[in-house]
């Protein structure tokens, strides 16, 4: 029997994963399994750069806009279980090679290695930290995280309030750095894993990010974010591209400043993605 294989096409935001994933999927007659923690949500379309309708119709996609921001919070642990169950079904249906693509490093690690045995959430502490996030903003929390766990501060998406809250919660609850839990034994998978990382020269990548944000504005990002403003406290909306516009709507700065901040924060996010993957020596990097 042929050995089952998962090819993961990863890389920073705007590097060009979508087009190449379509080519790979056609090559291996595979659907595409998305591992993007924000493209999951159907209410967040323009700001998360979901594949176009044409791209989605060209190849079957999974985990694209199949959850709601109003539903239960989606986690990497849930993704691990659902993605593995989906792959098992697809392999059993005759697929020998499957294609996964996305930029959520935590989700990719969950599929490849399994999640570490993090302590369960403390509801009271979580509520307290979420209230601080609401009243103080993410900056106060991430400075506290930087003090308690510099390693997590460097690798966690510190613009994502949910991620910062969870990391800080574990630090405060256990007295140990959140990063210290990421040392559990890797779980063995019954399929081969090949990771292909896409890169571009930094100036090229940053230009692509800037132009993508310009296109998002042309496509109606401001209107999309305005429609979500009443729900701005939801965890899923603590995301680059939305939170800057929410602050603009509240009068913090003008629309051009909002656009500049989205471009800057997206560039910072791309840098954090690369920092996360720098520790993974199994990735075969390819400059495009």
Image (tube, helix red, strand yellow):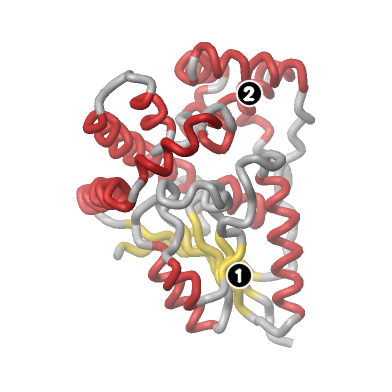
The residue at 29%/46% (across/down) is 217
Residue 198, image x, y percentages: 38, 60
Are circles 2 and 1 on residues that touch, CB within 8 Å?
no
Label total for image: 2
Answer with left or right where residue 152 lies relative to residue 218.
right
Answer with left or right where residue 148 lies relative to residue 213.
right
Up the image or down, 196 lies above or below 172; here it is below
**Mark closer to the chain start, 2 or 1:** 1
Give the residue number, with chain letter if any, for mark 1.
Answer: 6
Element carrying mark 2? loop
Up the image or down, 243 lies above or below 141; here it is below
Residue 51, image x, y percentages: 44, 63
Q: Residues within 10 Å of mark 2 (few under 14, many from 20)?
A: many
Choose top left, top right, bottom left or bottom right for residue 2. Answer: bottom right
Foreground: disc 2 or disc 1: 1
Give the residue number, with chain letter if any, for mark 2.
Answer: 177
Residue 136, image x, y percentages: 50, 12
Which residue is outermost to the bottom?
Answer: 1
The answer to whether residue 202 shows anywhere in this view is: no
The residue at 66%/56% (across/down) is 111
Residue 274, image x, y percentages: 41, 46
- Report, in whole angstroms, how far the alpha carbon at label 2 lies from the one at label 1: 32 Å
The answer to whether residue 193 shows anywhere in this view is: yes
Say the numbered circle drawn on residue 118. Answer: none
Residue sitting nearer the eye, 185 or 164 = 164
Element carrying mark 1? strand
The residue at 50%/32% (across/down) is 238
The residue at 45%/74% (across/down) is 22
Residue sitting nearer the eye, 23 or 58 = 58
């Amino acid at each position: 029997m042929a050995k089952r294989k998962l090819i993961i096409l990863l890389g920073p935001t705007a590097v060009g994963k979508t087009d190449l994933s379509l080519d790979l999927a056609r090559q291996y007659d595979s659907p595409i399994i998305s591992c993007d923690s924000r493209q999951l949500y159907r209410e967040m379309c323009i700001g998360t750069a979901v594949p176009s309708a044409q791209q989605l119709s060209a190849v079957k996609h999974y985990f694209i806009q199949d959850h709601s921001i109003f539903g239960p919070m989606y986690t990497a642990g849930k993704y691990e279980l659902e993605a593995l169950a989906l792959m098992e079904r697809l392999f059993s249906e005759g697929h020998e090679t499957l294609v996964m693509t996305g930029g959520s490093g935590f989700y990719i690690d969950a599929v490849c290695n399994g999640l570490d045995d993090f302590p369960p959430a403390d509801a009271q502490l979580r509520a307290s930290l979420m209230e601080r996030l609401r009243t103080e903003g993410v900056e106060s929390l991430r400075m506290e995280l930087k003090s308690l766990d510099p390693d997590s501060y460097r690798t966690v998406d510190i613009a994502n309030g949910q991620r910062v809250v969870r990391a800080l919660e574990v630090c405060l609850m256990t007295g140990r750095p959140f990063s210290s839990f990421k040392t559990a034994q890797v779980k063995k998978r019954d399929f081969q894993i090949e990771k292909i990382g896409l890169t571009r020269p930094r100036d090229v990548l940053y230009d692509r990010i800037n132009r993508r944000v310009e296109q998002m504005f042309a496509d109606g990002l401001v209107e999309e974010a305005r429609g979500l403003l009443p729900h701005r406290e939801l965890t899923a909306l603590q995301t680059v591209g939305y939170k800057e516009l929410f602050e603009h709507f509240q009068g913090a700065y003008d629309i051009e400043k909002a656009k500049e901040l989205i471009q800057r924060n997206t560039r910072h996010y791309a840098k954090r993605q690369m920092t996360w993957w720098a520790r993974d020596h199994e990735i075969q990097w390819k400059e495009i």
